[in-house]
Image: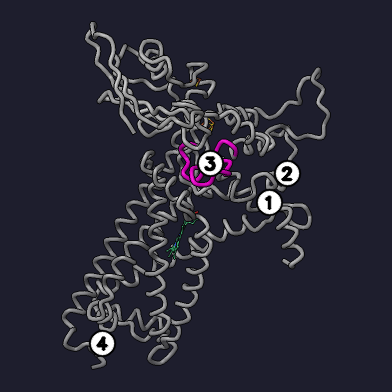
Amino acid sequence: MINKSTQVEENTEGYREIEITVFRYNSQNKNDTPEYQTYKLIETPGMTLYIALIKIWSTMDHHLSFDFVCRAGICGSCSMVVNGKPRLACKTRTNEFEDGKITLLPLPTFKHIKDLSVDTGNWMNAMSKKVESWIHTKEKTDIAAIEKPIEPEDAQAVFDLDRCIECGICLASCSTKIMREDFVGAVGLNRTARFAIDPHDERTDAEFYELIGDDNGVFGCMSLMGCEDHCPKELPLQTKIAYMRRKMVKA
Amino acid sequence: MSQKDNTVELLTGKNNFGKKSRIPAKLDFLQSVTGLFLALFITFHILFESSILFGKEAMYRLTKLFEGEPFIEGGEPLIITALAMVIFSMFIFHAFLAMRKFPASYKEYQRYRAHRELLNHQDTNLWFIQITTGFAMFFLGSIHLYMMMTSPEKIGPYASADRIFSDWMWPMYLLLLVSVVMHAWVGVYRLIIKWGWFDGKDPRKNRKRSKLIIKVLIAVYLFIGLVSLASYMKIGYDHQSDYGSRYVMEKIK
Ligand code: HEM
Ligand code: SF4
Ligand code: FES
């Protein structure tokens, strides 16, 4: 592994210089070897990692790969490992790091593409199918009619869990998922909880058991709480996994 | 389950009725039940052991109480054998169930370890304590329990102290003590989270509180355990020249 370093720009306004070290590797290229590359740049006020990476990309290194869409913590594309912690880059300010040294790695457990870019989409899609992430009802849906009303508390509880942005941070923070590839993780268990509490969904506990009643599902969780402690949307993952576990042991 | 049912599950991953097996649910639940049982046992066991801190007589009386002395003249050590057998069975059953969670290959271990070091997350680190102490107890716990089953009569202020000091059991007991205290309390913390026992209105705050209480309990139990062990060491040291002779209560003498 080599360490490369790239230096740019004159510091004219007295802002501090920060060092961003990035994992560089192209998984598509058989001859490529992983390396860490360090970029030095001037920190501007309010700088996020998104801004810093765009600056590196536009002024120093056009070959650096990373993903962003919304820049506002909504789309979940920009998750990466920031000094050991999986986080959203667009919601992480550089001034949080006192020594100005930041190391960026791609999210582990997902299929690596290049540099900071990983494929979360296909995994999430497969997970959605695995836990049958849609309303199951015998009632025929009439899209012209107004939806059947439900209790405001139920709606609130469902919306709360629906805030998940599929960023994959819960999986990248989970040692169980790191060890056992087929584990559905907090995002999958949270999804089943979301439908289990939704009155529109008619599935019974026994039916949910068919989806998550094994060691790849809820019984695989070892309560390490990486998900709970890193989820950028602060979803109640700890309590929702426990909720599904209690249901499933009785199902 | 019959051979035929087993074959159906082998071929389809589902049982005869086209349903997933309920066994994983039972395993998960029983892992917690056996863990909790052992944790409760050890909570009292360490306290009983510490009776030595109140003097040889206190420890002697308690030992005789466990041997059923109020009802049986002179006490019956076989009661201890029976008790140790129950604990040993639970211990083996728990180890059998929890073993499923150990990293099972180099790849799993490498990935777990690298990730744990990268993440540096407290609860993930606590799990590491749990598997290392669990692994150590395969051996340490078995030695101790087997001895209690086979030589139950050799418990008492001098008999235990001789075993610990002159028979060189103290390094084993020291390791066992540290392992069991950490493992049991970290395990109880895990149970609290796993089943959502004390979620209350603010689960996040209550989790912090549970963790703090667990840390205090680990410190308290380590302290009690270590001081008791030191006390047996001292007694054993002073008793070297009389090795093997048994404690007799003052009044009886
Ligand atoms: C050979 C002996 C033992 C082994 C190999 C062992 C192993 C383990 C492992 C690997 C876990 C973690 C399971 C998971 O993450 O899901 C665990 C959990 C636990 N252990 Fe042990 N253990 C042993 C003895 C004990 C003893 C002596 C106690 C109590 C004094 C105990 C109490 C617990 C508790 C309360 C849990 C939490 C249970 C759960 O998460 O469902 N264990 N054990
Ligand atoms: S549960 Fe949280 S951490 Fe996991 S994918 Fe959803 S938003 Fe991301
Ligand atoms: S870019 Fe959409 S969450 Fe960061």
Apparent side of residue B172 relative to residue A87 in the rendered image (left or right): left
Residue B33 left/right relative to A83: right
Q: Are marks 1 and 3 on the same chain?
A: yes
- Crowd tier of the residue under label 4, counting other residues whose Cα lies within 10 Å: few below 14, some 14–19, many 20 or above: few
Q: Which residue is mark 4?
A: B247
Q: Chain of mark 4?
A: B
Vertical position of residue A58 compared to residue B208: above or below: above
Highlighted magenta segment, given as a residue range: A172-188
- Label 2 packing within 10 angstroms: few (<14), some (14-19), many (20+): few
Mark 4 and mark 1 in contact (Cβ < 8 Å)?
no
In the image, residue A187 lies at what x, y percent? 56, 35
**Secondary structure at numbered mark 4:** loop
Give the amino acid type for the residue marked by disc 3 in the picture.
Answer: Thr
Say if residue B209 shows up in the picture. no
Give the residue drawn at x 41%, y 42%: B115
Of marks 1 and 3, which one's residue comes earlier in the chain? 3
**x then y, percent, for residue B19:** 74, 52
Q: Position of residue B45 (x, y in %)?
A: 38, 70
Mark sitting on residue A239: 3
User: Where is the C terminus of chain B found, in terms of image quarters?
Assistant: bottom left
- Distance CA(mark 2)–CA(mark 3): 20 Å
Vertical relation: A242 (above or below) A112? below
User: Where does label 1 land, which residue?
Assistant: A251
**Which numbered disc, 4 or 2, marks the residue closer to the eye?**
2
